[in-house]
Image (cartoon, rainbow, N blue to C red):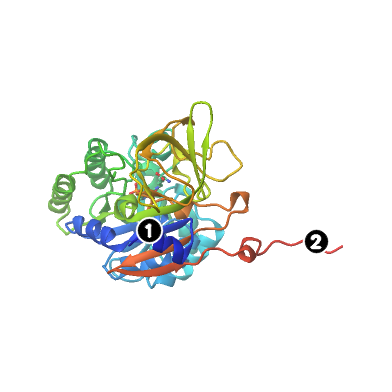
Amino acid sequence: MPIPELAERFGTPLYVYDASAISRRIADLQAFDVIRYAQKANSNLAILDFMLRRNVVVDAVSAGEIRRAQAAGFSGASQPPGIVYTADIFDRDALDIVVSDHIPVNAGSLDMIEQLGDRAPGRNIMLRINPGFGHGHSQKTNTGGEQSKHGIWHGRLGDALLLADRCGLGITGLHMHIGSGSDLEHLAQVCSAMESAARTVGRTVMTISAGGGLPIAYRATDTDVDIDAYFSLWDATRKRLESEFGHRVTLEIEPGRYLVAESGYLIAEIRAVKRTAGKTFYLVDAGFNNLARPILYGAYHPMSVCRTDADEPGLLDVVVGGPLCESGDIFTQEEGGFVRTRSLPAARVGDFLVIERAGAYGAVMASNYNSKPFAAEVLVEQDRCHLIRDRQSYEDLMRGERIPAR
Ligand code: LLP
């Protein structure tokens, strides 16, 4: 799709998702019995619908994510469940919906077990276990170990079992997710932790979930993970449990980033080329209100420039920043806020900057800071462009706010 055409038709900043990239990643994971998409990575209804049509089910972490999944056509009652609620708390809405709509629960705290047991005794649940270690691309995305608020601490599994029993809840599954953007070395350690937890629970365990966390290649030097090797480790774990329990054990995987990151492009227009004593800045019309990963984690995203004229482009070391009234609104930064330069083609105002691999944790983490409306989103499927989210209007931006009557 020619970028100037997309920009002309839908405006900028604009998120564009390539459906074929999502399909390829779904295909990679077919060996797992169940692919459960962590919709927090990108929960646009059209993306959820795309998953539904490919037999991918979803994870929900809030009442809102349950409602989205239901709006896209998923149900908690299908087999395997179309929706599972995974969290460390129930807010009151989530508890009401889980109870009334029979949404299966993956409980990350003893309080969740007690609260669900009070309202809906007789149900089966899964337990999310913190195996005592974790790893992510940033300390902020590490979800295991003592520093983490997530999951039931492995040493308290016995207490969780007693409590569930007292509350009349059955434990039919176990789940471990040690962090986002982890690596195979750490992910592989989860298998033995899972095996030992499952042996503690015993043969009521019908499902084990490997969680998400699969990394993707953001930098040219990053390599793709060896999914076959990863599956083999989990499959061997599952098989040992099957022979111990004497029944089949379903193996789930719960990726977010892996399925959608590479599909997404954030298209922005260069609106100023600013030179200071030592640096050149490309200032574009997208900021951390659209893509927060660089300011939050110092995350690296590949970038390219689409020029609107045919001049021979030379390369330039530039800093890429957005429109926001905040110094941290820089896409080329490292963790800690250190500004870096990127080698990009010489460009002018009116050229386009494309931030790549932005399909996961991009649009979903957007904000209205500086009263910037949410960007439009487009899904490209079989050479057709579908507008899957309107650019937010200024009216919508202020919706719900009230000036008190005096
Ligand atoms: N399952 C659970 C229980 C999770 O908490 C998460 C991510 C996932 C699955 C999916 O992880 P993934 O496969 O995408 O790595 N905003 C951060 C990522 C936060 C992830 C939170 N939980 C980022 O932009 O890198």
Q: Nearer the viewer, residue 348 or 214?
A: 348
Residue 250, x across and y down, in percent: 22, 58
User: Nearer the viewer's eye, disc 2 or disc 1?
Assistant: 1
Q: How many marks?
A: 2
Residue lying at 22% horizontally and 42% vertically, measured from the top left:
191
- Residue 161 visible? The answer is no
Instruction: Check the picture and name the quadrant holding the C terminus.
Output: bottom right
Name the residue: 70% across, 61% down: 401
- Circle 1 SS class: helix
Q: Quadrant of residue 36?
A: bottom left
Residue 3, label in figure: 1
Q: Earlier in the sequence, mark 2 or mark 1?
A: 1
**What's the residue type where badge 2 is placed?**
Pro
The answer to whether residue 394 is above or below residue 198 is: below
Q: Which amino acid does the dot numbered 1 rest on?
A: Ile
- Residue 404: give its label: 2
> Relative to 313, is 34 on the left or the right?
left
